[in-house]
């Protein structure tokens, strides 16, 4: 049985990043749903469709008012939540054995994931940086993590 991945986009401001995440979700496979939460752009945004190149029609998505409501629903279904954020207790994304079903939260490009969302998460994941910047673009990060989960 393959993985079942639920992607939760927590207030991603760039429609181009969201479109790129749709492309990566389709490419990696195994994505059951992308939740577009809060200020995250809806799929009919021309910038999203320009970047997604049709992948927005291949990967199911729903727009939700808040990330909290989505995480609570996923937790009620027993789906563990992995938030990608720079925290002191975050686990290296390549050193985790991922379960068959999971949700992955990607946060706002500048502000990251709020403490309220982190409190609802079961795990915090980090992508270690080897250069001088402390993080990658959210769409690039999502690509690497999705492919690692499905490896």
Image (spheres, rainbow, N blue to C red):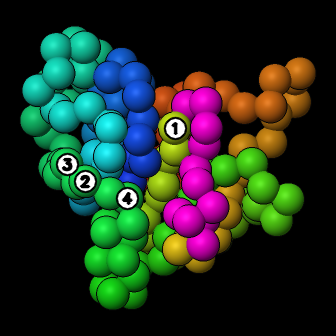
Q: Locate the N terminus and report the quarter of the image it occupies.
A: bottom left
Left or right: where 111 falls relative to 1: right
Mark 1 vs 3, N-terminal side? 3
> What residue do we see at 40% from left, 23% from top?
14
The residue under the point 41% across, 28% down is 13
Q: Which residues are magenta?
A: 109-119
Q: Secondary structure at mark 1?
A: loop
Distance from Cα at disc 2 to Cα at disc 4:
7 Å
The residues tagged by marks 1 and 2 sit, at their Cα atoms, a distance apart of 15 Å
The location of residue 8, given as percent across then percent down, is: 38, 54
Q: Which mark identifies residue 65?
A: 2
Looking at marks 1 and 4 on the same chain, the residue that comes earlier in the sequence is marked by 4
| Residue appearing at x 53%, y 63% in the figure | 117
Question: What residue is rendered at 19% in x and 48% in y?
Answer: 63
Instruction: Check the image and report above or below for 76 versus 28.
Output: below
- Dots 3, 2 in contact, CB < 8 A: no
> Mark 2: which secondary structure?
loop
């Amino acid at each position: 049985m393959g993985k079942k991945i639920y992607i939760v986009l927590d207030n991603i401001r760039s429609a181009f990043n969201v479109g790129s995440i749709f492309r990566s979700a389709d490419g990696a496979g195994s994505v059951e749903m992308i939740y577009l939460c809060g200020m995250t752009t809806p799929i009919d945004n021309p910038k999203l469709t320009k970047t997604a190149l049709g992948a927005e029609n291949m990967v199911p998505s729903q727009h939700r008012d808040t990330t909290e409501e989505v995480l609570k629903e996923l937790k009620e279904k027993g789906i563990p939540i992995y938030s990608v954020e720079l925290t002191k207790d975050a686990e290296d994304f390549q050193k985790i054995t991922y379960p068959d079903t999971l949700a992955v939260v990607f946060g706002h490009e500048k502000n990251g994931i709020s403490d309220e969302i982190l409190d609802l998460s079961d795990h915090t994941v980090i992508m270690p940086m080897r250069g001088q910047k402390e993080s990658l673009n959210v769409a690039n990060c999502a690509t690497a993590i999705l492919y690692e989960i499905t490896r």
